[in-house]
Amino acid sequence: MKANKTLGYEYIKGFWETNPVLKQVLGMCPTLAVTVSVMNGLAMALATTFVLVFSSLLISSIRKLIPNQVRIAAFIVVIATFVTIADLVMKAQFPDLSKALGPFVPLIVVNCIILGRAEAFASKNSPFRSFLDALGNGTGFLIVLVVMGGIRELIGSRTLLGYQILPNGFEPWLIMILPAGAFLTLGLLMGLANFYVDKKKRSEREELIQKYRKSQNDVEVKGQEA
């Protein structure tokens, strides 16, 4: 039961605790550049998750065969292999989407999320744990990109996934589909995340203080009764 909880944690932690964007502040270039729409954000996140999962799985499987002196170079070779696969498949099956994402799919090879998880986790843990860790971090990355893409597309173009949502009377905010809109949206999301963390810490601190005061009162009452 304990093992199952631990394995579940390896996946779930990527949603929030080790979220690549909100917590580790990694992968900022694609996060800011491609989230002009939900579809772009979704496609970029799925491509990144594919590379992250399979590169982590392979690196973990061969970690004992890789000399320590060349481990980073070996990691990059593995990552580049899966990036090439993702890029070629996207160009063949989704040419319009590949064109919209531009150079950011090939640039996944230098994405700090992937190399970071390979160095920090996959090279030190079993293949299954590395798979769960990569999948969780990929899912966390996907959530942020889809949310950002949704906000920017809705306010900047009145649409979601190409379908008009807001009425014609709403004047689109042009800034939201420009680079400045990406910075504003990401700043808002990170601000909300930090606000939630601070509020939770204050709540836990107040709860501890109340427990301490209650224990002190209990001690005083017992002393008076004695």
Image (spheres, grey):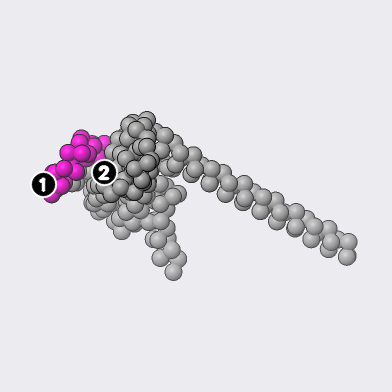
Bin the neighbour count of mark 1 within 10 Å (Cα to Cα): few under 14, some 14-19, many 20 and up.
Answer: few
Residue 110 shows in the view: yes
Task: Looking at the image, tell me whether mark 1 or mark 2 is earlier in sequence order.
Answer: 2
Task: State which quadrant residue 1 falls in.
Answer: bottom left
Residue that carries the numbered disc 1 in the rendered image: 92
User: Residue 34: within the magenta?
Assistant: no
Residue at image coords 26%, 47%: 162
Q: What element carries label 2?
A: helix
Point out the residue furthest to the bottom here. Answer: 1
The kind of residue on which mark 2 rests is: Asn
Which stretch did the figure color magenta?
A: 89-118
Picture coordinates of residue 216 (x, y %)? 78, 55
Point out the residue furthest to the left here. Answer: 92
Whether residue 32 is situated above or below residue 124 in the rendered picture? above
Residue at image coords 30%, 35%: 33
Prevailing SS of the magenta stretch: helix
Residue placed most toward the observer, 224 or 110:
110
Residue placed most toward the observer, 58 or 209:
209
Disc 1 and disc 2: Cα gap in Å? 17 Å
Picture coordinates of residue 80 (x, y %)? 19, 41
Picture coordinates of residue 4 (x, y %)? 40, 65
Q: What element carries label 1?
A: helix
Disc number at residue 40? 2
Residue placed most toward the observer, 41 or 1:
41
Picture coordinates of residue 30 (x, y %)? 30, 38
Whether residue 205 is situated above or below residue 30 in the rendered picture? below
Residue 123 shows in the view: no
Bin the neighbour count of mark 2 within 10 Å (Cα to Cα): few under 14, some 14-19, many 20 and up.
Answer: many
Are the residues at dot 1 and dot 2 in contact (C-beta closer than 8 Å)?
no
Which marked residue is nearer to the observer: mark 1 or mark 2? Answer: 2
